[in-house]
Image (spheres, rainbow, N blue to C red):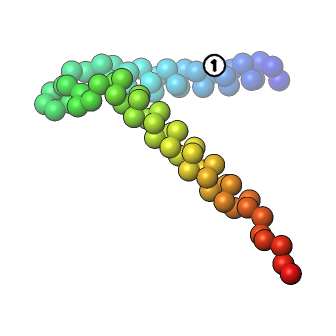
Amino acid sequence: MGAFLRRLLAAGVAMALVTIGPLSSLARADHGGPLRMAPMSPLLVGVLAGVLALAAGLIIVVIATLLRKKAPPSE
């Protein structure tokens, strides 16, 4: 049974290398036109993503606290 699993794993790795190999060479291609220069710096993109993630987290906390608010006691 162990030999079968080793062969299966080797076949999966070979398939991944055959599939990913040509695609990785395409990723290194020089793109012309508007894709040559990025519209925003990577630092700005990272800061923007961080701010948006923080805002989403704060909104979730606010909604959770509003939903957990206890009802006023009935008379």
Residue 42, compared with residue 66, is above or below; it is above
Q: Secondary structure at mark 1?
A: helix
72 or 51: nearer the viewer:
72
Residue at the image position 57 percent from the left and 43 percent from the top: 57
Q: Residue furthest bottom?
A: 75
Q: Residue furthest left?
A: 33
The image position of residue 63, as x and y in percent, is: 62, 56
Q: Quadrant of the N terminus?
A: top right
Q: Residue furthest front?
A: 75
- Kind of residue at badge 1: Ala
40 or 10: nearer the viewer:
40
Q: What is the quadrant of residue 26 in the picture?
A: top left
Residue at the image position 66 percent from the left and 22 percent from the top: 9
The image position of residue 8, as x and y in percent, is: 68, 25
The image position of residue 4, as x and y in percent, is: 75, 23
Q: Quadrant of the C terminus?
A: bottom right
Q: How many circles with numbers are drawn on the protein?
A: 1
Left or right of 50 in this view: 29: left
Q: What is the quadrant of residue 65 in the picture?
A: bottom right
43 or 2: nearer the viewer:
43
Q: Residues within 10 Å of mark 1 (few under 14, many from 20)?
A: few
Residue at the image position 78 percent from the left and 71 percent from the top: 72
Left or right of 17 in this view: 61: right
The image position of residue 29, as x and y in percent, is: 25, 21
Is residue 27 among what the camera can see?
yes
- Mark 1 sits on what residue? 10
Left or right of 15 in this view: 38: left
